[in-house]
Image (cartoon, helix red, strand yellow):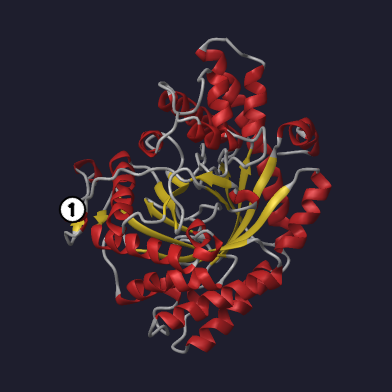
Amino acid sequence: MINMKEVFETIDMVEKENLDVRTITMGISLIDCADNDVAAACRKIEEKIKKHAGRLAATADGIAREFGVPIVNKRVSITPVSIVGSSCCRDTGDYVRIAETLDRTASEIGINFLGGFSAIVSKGMTGSDRLMIESIPEALARTGTVCSSVNVGSTKTGINMDAVRLMGQIVRKTAMLTKDTDSSGCAKLVVLCNAPDDNPFMAGAFHGVTEADAVINVGVSGPGVVKYALEKVRGESFEVLCETIKKTAFKITRVGQAVARVASERLGIPFGIIDLSLAPTPAVGDSVADILQEIGLEKAGAPGTTAALALLNDQVKKGGVMASSYVGGLSGAFIPVSEDQGMIEAVEAGALSIEKLEAMTCVCSVGLDMIAIPGDTSESTISGIIADEAAIGMINQKTTAVRIIPVIGKSVGDTVEFGGLLGHAPVMPVNSFGCEGFISRTGRIPAPIHSFKN
């Protein structure tokens, strides 16, 4: 059992080391909201979200005050909208109408983000899937809280290259429709491979069809806590380094477990998972890149970076698994450029490139995340970047993702300001050689040989 004493032991982590519960995310199934009429479906969606999550924000704020641990975001994830809307959406406008309903509902109940304007098309696309994907640019341009994701591949099915090609077009169109805010719509759009059903972090969160009617998932983050712990063992052996990370991750996860248990009891919703992901913020001292430097690198991106990140990610997972029986989601280290001050400084110093970030994604929790690129980057190049990340995920049996932002009107050397947790980012160069001949092929890349395990 978790007691209050364990929570009080973390007060220093909160006050001095930027420990927080990054999000309480309520997953809600909307399968029973499907209807032949889009107006009726929207009404059912609004009613169900309000029924389950109407008290989410107030409950989270109360727990934060009681425990003395900040709960930064209150979020909702829902059944992929391409499934919910398949019976009633006849055109992209119908899907946009659902997105606007979700946005209005999220604002009324006081949550920060709502994820699940999504489609799962790892093997093929239905007509509904394609319509929903084609509606994404307008939906994100018209809403503020709605987040969108598309899963284009998996280890079991391979990579749907038709969907990859389409997503290159969608990312660029989203950038164009939100160009007045530095193409910020793309910050709410992620393309995944091996997407988990229970991820509480945006923009990739959705409530998978294998989940219960409603669940509470909690995401805890503490890069600053880990860095502070490592400062005390500077120069020690790898054994000491690993043990320190693991024990620190254990303590952080216990905080999340306590918060999740209490939230579950007060809301009357079953507990799902704890996601221990070292998710950085733009705040000084809350950086994964700073952890890598504390391990011994001059800058993130230096030789040894991938090895150091692999070590960090593995020990975080080991510590988390010991602290909770239900660790899930992504649980590891995130490397979003715009949201991590240390990563931004590494890019500006010339230590970190997209190619090095791609290598790092082989061993981190997600992938190429919150990276600003020139606004004139072609659709096929964007699709090629997505394909590369999906291949890493497929072959390595892990989740990978691309949240990339072609900032219309900006070029290499410019800086983009997104604000809040999204931070700011230098525009990074991309490889100037084309891949149109590869991306224009139709069909899918087959699943790898090691996917056949029956």
* SS type, badge 1: helix
Decide if residue 242 is in sight here.
Answer: no
Decide if residue 46 is in sight here.
Answer: yes
Q: Quadrant of residue 28?
A: bottom right
User: Residue 251 in the image: x percent, y percent?
Assistant: 67, 31
Count the numbered circles shown: 1
Given residues 246 and 289, the one toward you in this image is 289
Q: For the point 38% across and 69% down, which residue is it?
A: 133
**Could you tell me which quadrant the N terminus lies in?**
top right
Q: Quadrant of residue 170?
A: bottom left
Q: For the point 48% across and 86% down, which residue is it?
A: 38
- Residue 418 left/right relative to 58: left
User: Residue 94 in the image: x percent, y percent?
Assistant: 45, 83
Given residues 440 and 52, the one toward you in this image is 440
Q: Is residue 151 above or below residue 293?
A: below
- Residue 219 left/right relative to 430: right
- Amino acid type indicated by mark 1: Phe
Given residues 413 and 390, the one toward you in this image is 413
User: Residue 295 in the image: x percent, y percent?
Assistant: 54, 20
Q: Is residue 212 above or below residue 289?
A: below
Q: Residue furthest right?
A: 66
Q: Which residue is mark 1?
A: 438
Given residues 337 and 114, the one toward you in this image is 337
Q: For the point 51% across and 70% down, which residue is it?
A: 141
Q: For the point 38% across and 85% down, which residue is it?
A: 90
- Residue 360 left/right relative to 379: right
Tell me the crowding category of disc 1: few under 14, some 14 to 19, or many 20 or more residues within 10 angstroms, Cα based: few
User: Residue 155 in the image: x percent, y percent?
Assistant: 29, 48
- Residue 35 left/right relative to 431: right
